[in-house]
Amino acid sequence: MQPYHLANRENAWYLVGHDAERDALRTFAVSRIQKVTVGSKKFTKPSDFSPEAYYAKSFGAFVGTGDHRVVVRFTPTAAAQVRERFWHETQEARELADGRLAACRT
């Protein structure tokens, strides 16, 4: 693991970096890391890595590829809890007649 950035997302810590085993940029939950070994091999963080750009279209700590519109319909019981929290800057919510809530992220 070549660490690039330590981020606090929704009150949890995540380590973002290059995973040499998978040859990919990955996000690791710090609370799940069981063992750390400091190596002597040097690396340089890519100059084009930007935490802001990396998390620009994320949902919390979850980062993916592509643009997707996601709609989730919540029961009246779950809808009450969903209404209490702001989830994402692109979220939209629509009250349904039966007390349910339709929430979407674009």
Image: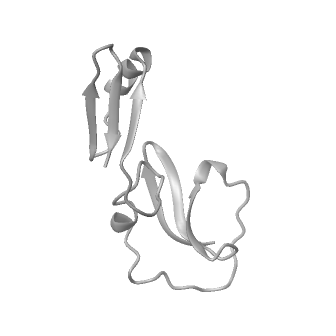
Q: On screen, 40 above or below 35?
A: below
Residue 18 position in % (x across, y down): 57, 74
Is 48 in front, or is 37?
Answer: 48
- Specify the color scheme: one colour
Can residue 62 be seen in the rendering of this structure? yes
Is 67 in front, or is 31?
Answer: 67
Residue plotted at (47% across, 60% down): 64
Q: On screen, 3 above or below 7?
A: below
In the visual, does 102 lie left or right of 1?
left
**To which quarter of the image does residue 53 belong?**
bottom left
Quick one: quadrant of the N terminus? bottom right
Residue plotted at (67% across, 72% down): 22
**To which quarter of the image does residue 10 belong?**
top left
**To which quarter of the image does residue 15 belong?**
bottom right
In the visual, does 8 lie left or right of 22?
left
Label total for image: 0
In the visual, does 84 lie left or right of 37?
left
Q: On screen, 30 above or below 4?
A: above
Residue plotted at (33% across, 64% down): 52
Can residue 84 be seen in the rendering of this structure? no
Is 51 in front, or is 70?
Answer: 70
Residue 85 position in % (x across, y down): 33, 30
Q: On screen, 14 above or below 74?
A: below
Residue 28 position in % (x across, y down): 59, 58
Residue 90 position in % (x across, y down): 27, 47
